[in-house]
Image (cartoon, rainbow, N blue to C red):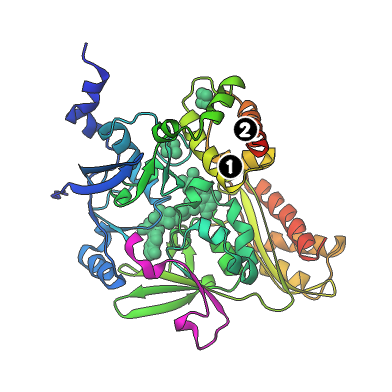
Amino acid sequence: MTNQIEQIQVTTTVNGEKVTALVEPRTNLVDFLRNQMELTGTHVGCEHGVCGACTVRIDGEIVRGCLMLAIQADGLEVVTIEGSDDSGEIADLQKAFHERNALQCGFCTPGMLMAITEMLEKNPDPSRQEIREYLSGNYCRCTGYEAIVDAIETVANTRKGA
Amino acid sequence: MKSLKWLLNEKKIREVQLKPSAFNYAKPSSVDEVLGLLSEYGDEATILAGGQSLMPTLNMRLSAPALVIDINGLSDLSGISVDGENLRVDGENLRIGALTRHTEIENSPGIAEHAPLISMAMPYIAHPAIRNRGTFGGSIAMADPAAELPACLCALDGEVEVTGKSGARKVAAKDFFKDLYETDMAEGEILTAVEIPKLGAGYRSAFDELARRHGDYAMAGVAAHAKVDGGKISDLRLVFFAVGSTPVTAKKAMNAMEGQSVDDASIAAAQNALEQDLSPFGDLHSSAALKMHYAKELTKRVLTTLSGG
Ligand SMILES: Cc1cc2nc3c(=O)[nH]c(=O)nc-3n(C[C@H](O)[C@H](O)[C@H](O)COP(=O)(O)OP(=O)(O)OC[C@H]3O[C@@H](n4cnc5c(N)ncnc54)[C@H](O)[C@@H]3O)c2cc1C
Ligand code: FES
Ligand code: FES
């Protein structure tokens, strides 16, 4: 059907910076971040909620960037992997991932790190089983997960000791 | 060669990358406004709650509405209340606003106390990022045959509140789920809340499901609720999901357990009765026979849990 679609103004905070942009209602949050904001650290895999590559944080909670419209971020605070990296809050996780070979191609890594950040905030001392359950929605086609769980365990233990 | 940045900024390419077909967007702030838009647009409009089931269908263009009505601005549909304003008459119900997110329910001490079955089911629903957005009302409205919450609502004799032009009406859960993805809601109505009777004295719940991976939709699952007194089971509810087009209440198996204690003989009787209660159809992952096998195993597990074993 013919349908006059208007672009809508969205004002959101992305990685601490206030952004105002015009978007088509159908624009997914992850496409907005990658194409309009040029923040390509957030990846796009399945585009229907299954793989977790597009994980970002909205007002502190992890969400699927492919299952939210950009306009729904109006008035909310978005943090992407670029923001988490800049703030240094995940430096120890990144180091542990590197040292333990918890990434190979790296496609899943940004989404993994976003999900792990939320998990460790909620549960600073997760068991291996709890880690696996929390990350059940983040697919990795390379590592076989074992190294990822190891890296997280290491960080959790170090943070506890700190 | 042009740089990648040039490519990304090229408008034409950006448009190609938009997945859903074009739609208009409205974010009303009252139920009346939603109802007005629904009557204006009819089946050209779609309600967007958590978006965790709707967005995939838009991304894949399985649906192409002219108008998406985002109900996330309706604050009166959020949150959980016990004996809320409109419940003064009976005061025995837990009221869950349609927009209450899965995560909020998962973490709610009130739900854990008054409707423990719902708390038990929550971790099985998808993954944390999806539970942060997905809503209770969305799961009930969606009526996915493999979803946990419709079965739980049936097992707890819950009610669904549906609001339309002529006001709100309540439908018993057992009458709400009509067929595959089909509910008692008519065009122009929205789901506003769910009501669940508070846990009665002596009642217990148990929940279990089998899925290929944690968080996946179940291959088979069951919600159980019963009164347990001196090890004897009465008023049992066994409601299965992912074994039919709607939640399936296993009446024969329930009757077989009435007044019984849970032991090998009563479990076997309940399992046999399931043959008459369920007629599962096979899907991608499991044949009908395998689903029946799962259902029997799950029955054993939940009965054992109910009896405290
Ligand atoms: C990878 C993945 C795995 C999942 N696994 C599971 C699982 O294991 N178990 C499970 O139960 N769910 C699962 N889900 C679905 C998830 O629980 C959804 O949140 C839920 O099914 C729908 O809720 P929603 O709020 O997201 O609804 P939406 O996606 O916004 O809406 C779903 C449908 O219901 C309609 N609707 C929503 N709210 C209302 C309302 N108040 N009144 C009238 N109509 C309404 C919409 O128009 C739409 O047709 C999964 C989703 C994904 C992406
Ligand atoms: S791209 Fe969003 S979950 Fe796969
Ligand atoms: S490192 Fe390649 S997908 Fe995880």
Q: Position of residue B299 (x, y in %)?
A: 73, 58
**Alpha-carbon span between mark 2 and mark 1:** 9 Å
Counting labels gives 2
Q: Residues within 10 Å of mark 1 (few under 14, many from 20)?
A: some
Q: Residue furthest bottom?
A: B89
User: Label 1 amino acid?
Assistant: Leu
Query: Which quarter of the picture shows residue A99?
Result: top right
Give the numbered dot on residue A120.
1
Q: Compare residues A125 and B21 and report the one nearer the observer.
A: A125
Compared to residue B150, the image places residue A76 above or below, namely above
- Residue B185 shows in the view: no
Residue contact at pointers 2 and 1, CB within 8 angstroms: yes
Q: Position of residue B302 (x, y in %)?
A: 73, 60
Disc 2 element: helix
Q: Chain of mark 1?
A: A
Q: Position of residue A92 (x, y in %)?
A: 56, 29
Left or right: B300 as drawn, with respect to A39: right
Left or right: A52 as drawn, with respect to B290: left
User: Label 2 amino acid?
Assistant: Val
Q: Is residue B87 magenta?
A: yes
Q: Which residues are magenta?
A: B72-95
Marked residue nearer the N-terminal end (2 or 1): 1
Q: Which residue is mark 2?
A: A155
Q: Is residue A17 magenta?
A: no
Quarter in which the C terminus of chain B is drawn: bottom right
Q: Position of residue B170 (x, y in %)?
A: 45, 78
Quarter in which the N terminus of chain B is drawn: top left
Q: Chain of mark 2?
A: A
Q: Compare residues B117 and B180 and report the one nearer the observer.
A: B117
The answer to whether mark 1 is within 8 Å of ligand 3 is: no
